[in-house]
Amino acid sequence: MTATPFHDLDEFLALPRVGGLAVSRDGSRVVTTIAELDETRTEYVTAIWELDPDAKRPARRLTRGAKGESAPAFTSDGDLLFVASRSRVGAAEGDDKPPAALWRLPAEGGEAVAELTLPGGVDGVVAARDADTVLVRASLLQSAAGVEEDRRLRALRKDNKVSAVLHQGYPVRYWDHDIGPEQPHLLTLDGVRDITADPGRALHEADADISRNGLFAVTAWNAPAPGAAVRGRLMRVDVTTGERTVLVDDPCADLSHPVISPDGTRVAYLHETLTTPTEAPRITLWVKGFDGDPVRLAAEWDRWPTSVTWTDDGSALLVTADEAGRGPVYAVDPEHSTVTRLTRDDFTYTDVHAAPGGVLFALRSSYARPPHPVRVDADGTVTELPCVARPELPGNLVELSASAADGTTVRSWLALPAGADPAPLVLWVHGGPLASWNAWHWRWCPWLLTALGYAVLLPDPALSTGYGQDFIQRGWGDWGGAPYTDLMAATDAACEHPRVDGTRTAAMGGSFGGYMANWIAGHTDRFDAIVTHASLWALDQFGHTTDGAYWWAREMTSDMAERNSPHRHVGEISTPMLVIHGDRDYRVPIGEGLRLWYELLTDSVRPADDDGTSPHQFLYFPNEGHWVAMPQHAKVWYQVVASFLGTHVLGVETDLPDTLG
């Protein structure tokens, strides 16, 4: 077969990556962001490109900043706003890393001009559709009464080299960064008026929308809850006065993703029930009129909505949801709760934007295609918008089904290498665990292993989304039960495929997938090698040290942790394991990886010899988080994984990269 970009890690990392969309009010302009490697090949730089909504002209690059641009948004008069960090703009004396500023590219063309600079930078922007109102997302230090006070306090901390944070609430960390002393705010475009004064932690990771007339906004608003927990509610904020009114508050649920109807009379949102040790969450779609009670829509629809927006005329809601390894767009009638599927291909849709005339624009992807922009017409016709070239794959994707022990159907994607010979199998378990293998992932890409000659199995076991509430409930509180037996059933079915060599197999996964890799290691010796990344090992330890302990505590009782903790089975592990962990991983703290590594070397069937050698390996990234984000580290990740699998699955010794020293 002709070499593809997946046969060479440098070529793969250099592939341009499309992400996000912004659409003008009349649908005549569409922009996206494309990330590419910089000259050092150690960082991705994102630029804004304009797309032809009629799908006739090639994409046109609009921005060329050395540090990149992000978060594009159109104003009501067609100007393009975006966030960028550019030298000398907003920088203090002697500072070669200026904070991100808000820029404006006029609709009539010309050069972009700096619109707003703030001492802590600009994070994003929300623009009204039919008014010149623009709100800016930015962070201020918690005791700062305004931008100038924020500037003084930042200088004080910098000059005195103080990084300490005094917390009075929870959480204190999030994924790979510390929370505080900054707090997110919504400011007016001039950066002077704060419409969310004294927010505390209320706007951390919160979604916000602004009415078309620009008079008010609705935002998710986090509130403290019992047990050091956080719970989302919806807040209406008057843009002129900053007056806040609790719009919807359900003590038994998290509320998120508010979107205001075009006529400004209603808000749609997602409602996620709080879990218990015996009940999984349920995500549903709701609408509330500003002068009425909340109403649940599509109550009989057994799927979890993942995003929601209104059609341009407000007659329907456009909703995405996982569906059997795909993620279609649906239309939900807010009056009659009827659900109509709009897209029927094998893709997962994200970044859905409505335009006039029943048209919508979105990104779509699958495990056979990276994200790319499309237009969906009112009759359901999908048209690709010219953008980046589609990379050739080193094989093909097929769909498999297996029957679990209880008779439940477990479906999978299977990526097969080119050729006719049976290929060794790698079982790759997804994270989440409430997720699905249904969209392209640049970081977890099966085609890099397929290019090496492996067949890669991507199953959706119990707890996966897209198969209904009962399928999720099957694994709730019983991670080592149905999820494990489903994975084994899927593996058995894959081994029966004529293109798979079931005598040479490996298992791998990250996060919850890493948990399952650890569980598999302690419960079967059928695999020749196991790779576990950012994995949960000792649940009693993990549950209290992760960045959102309250969420896990709702499910992870002491009994659940006792029954489902992989560390209790270390004495049964005989398979060589590659442990991978980043020190800045706050979702699955480094203590999990360190304890796993030590107990493998001391308590497994194959511990370290007296001279310290063992078949196990530990790949450690001091400055990476839950994911390995830096391109040079992603390259090392795949090089080490390929070497480990080559040794234990193929029986071929492979040199490790020189960059490891």
Image (cartoon, grey):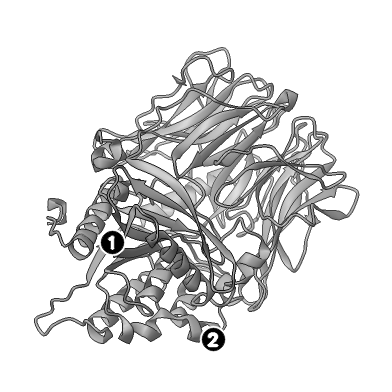
Q: How many marks?
A: 2
Q: Determine the secondary structure under disc 2.
A: helix
Amino acid type, label 2: Ser
609 with respect to 206 (left or right): left
Indicate the amino acid at tag 1: Pro
Q: Nearer the viewer, residue 174 or 481?
A: 481
Q: Is residue 434 above or below residue 228?
A: above
Q: Position of residue 24 (x, y in %)?
A: 64, 24
The first of marks 1 and 2 along the sequence is 2
Q: Which image quarter: residue 569?
A: bottom left
Q: Is residue 498 above or below residue 266?
A: below
Residue drawn at 66 percent across, 20 percent down: 77
**Which disc, if any, is residue 429?**
none
Q: Which residue is mark 1?
A: 622
Quadrant for residue 380, please give it: top right
- Residue at point 22%, 57% (across, down): 640
Dot 1: few (<14), some (14–19), or many (≥20) neighbours within 10 Å? Answer: few
Residue 95 in view, yes or no: no
Q: Nearer the viewer, residue 524 or 581?
A: 524
Q: Is residue 231 left or right of residue 166?
A: right
Q: Quadrant of the C terminus?
A: bottom left
Front residue (pair 279, 597): 279
Residue shown at 42% from the left, 68% from the top: 588
Helix, strand or loop under label 1? loop
Left or right: residue 212 versus residue 625 is right
Residue 213: horizontal and vertical position, in percent?
78, 31
Q: Tag 2: Cα neighbours inside 10 Å, few (<14), some, or many (≥20)?
A: few
Query: Mark 1, mark 2: which one is toward the viewer?
Result: 2
| Residue found at the very far left of the displayed protein | 611
Q: CA distance from mark 1 to mark 2?
A: 31 Å
Picture disc at residue 558: 2
Q: Vertically, is 365 above or below 615? A: above
